[in-house]
């Protein structure tokens, strides 16, 4: 399963890089057209916005897998191993519940907007809301895998609780 998550993370990173490159081309091209030629491409703004949303959600998935989200460990660091493990289990259960709510909401929005066309491109607005579905399903799988690893002893509480310090704390 770890290999699958590794492959999935690398694929998401490729999609994010392509998305960012497309955003740069679309926005720069549109700005240039507006400034130099006093015209623009209407679909450029819409596609840039959609790509931004998708890149954000895909980046959150990658960060979840790499445990790269910022956290604070001032309480967790002071707890014994059993307390750390209990806090991590509760935290993961809460995150699983939150991801489930995101999945339900994103799925409903995707279904509601399936037949709604975007103003510029005419594409289904379900593509836009589908980003939440992809995020929620991916995050649910990652969190469940990590929680199962913690409960079975494959992952230690210290491994799972490894936090990234903010840049301000590193100085």
Image (tube, rainbow, N blue to C red):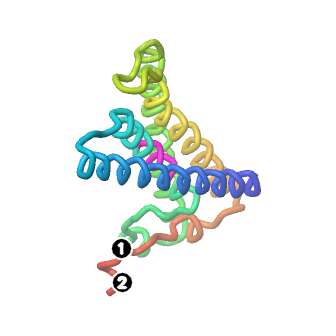
Instruction: Check disc 2 and report the residue beneath it.
Output: 170
Residue numbers of the magenta segment? 53-59
Say which of 153 and 52 sits in front.
52
Instruction: Check disc 1 and report the residue beneath it.
Output: 166
- Would you say the magenta stretch is mainly helix, strand or loop? helix
Distance from Cα at disc 2 to Cα at disc 1: 7 Å
**Residue 55 counted in the magenta span:** yes
Query: Mark number for residue 45?
Result: none
Q: Position of residue 152 (x, y in %)?
A: 71, 55
Say which of 83 and 137 sits in front.
137
Q: Position of residue 28 (x, y in %)?
A: 36, 54
The residue located at (54%, 45%) in the rendering is 139
Q: In the shown orientation, is residue 84 left or right of residue 46?
A: right
**Residue 131 counted in the magenta span:** no
Q: In this rendering, is residue 90 above or below 82? A: above
The outermost residue toward the bottom is 171
Q: Position of residue 110 (x, y in %)?
A: 46, 22
The outermost residue toward the front is 37
Q: In this rendering, is residue 73 above or below 86? A: below
Categorize mark 2 by other alpha carbons within 10 Å: few (<14), some (14-19), many (20+).
few
The residue located at (39%, 65%) in the rendering is 71
Say which of 141 and 149 sits in front.
141
The residue located at (56%, 71%) in the rendering is 158
Q: Position of residue 134 (x, y in %)?
A: 55, 37
């Amino acid at each position: 399963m770890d290999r699958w998550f590794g492959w999935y993370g690398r694929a998401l990173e490729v999609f994010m890089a392509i998305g960012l490159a497309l955003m740069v081309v679309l926005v720069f091209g549109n700005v240039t057209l507006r400034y130099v030629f006093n015209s623009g491409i209407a679909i450029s703004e819409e596609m840039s916005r959609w790509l931004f949303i998708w890149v954000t959600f895909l980046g959150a998935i990658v960060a979840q897998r790499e445990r790269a989200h910022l956290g604070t460990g001032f309480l967790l660091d002071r707890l014994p191993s059993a307390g750390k493990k209990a806090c991590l289990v509760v935290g993961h259960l809460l995150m699983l519940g939150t991801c489930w709510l995101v999945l339900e909401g994103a799925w409903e929005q995707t279904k509601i907007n399936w037949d709604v066309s975007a103003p510029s491109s005419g594409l289904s607005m379900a593509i836009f809301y589908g980003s939440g579905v992809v995020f929620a399903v991916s995050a649910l799988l990652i969190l469940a895998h990590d929680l199962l690893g913690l409960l079975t002893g494959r992952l230690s509480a210290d491994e799972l609780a490894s936090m990234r310090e903010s840049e301000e704390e590193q100085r």
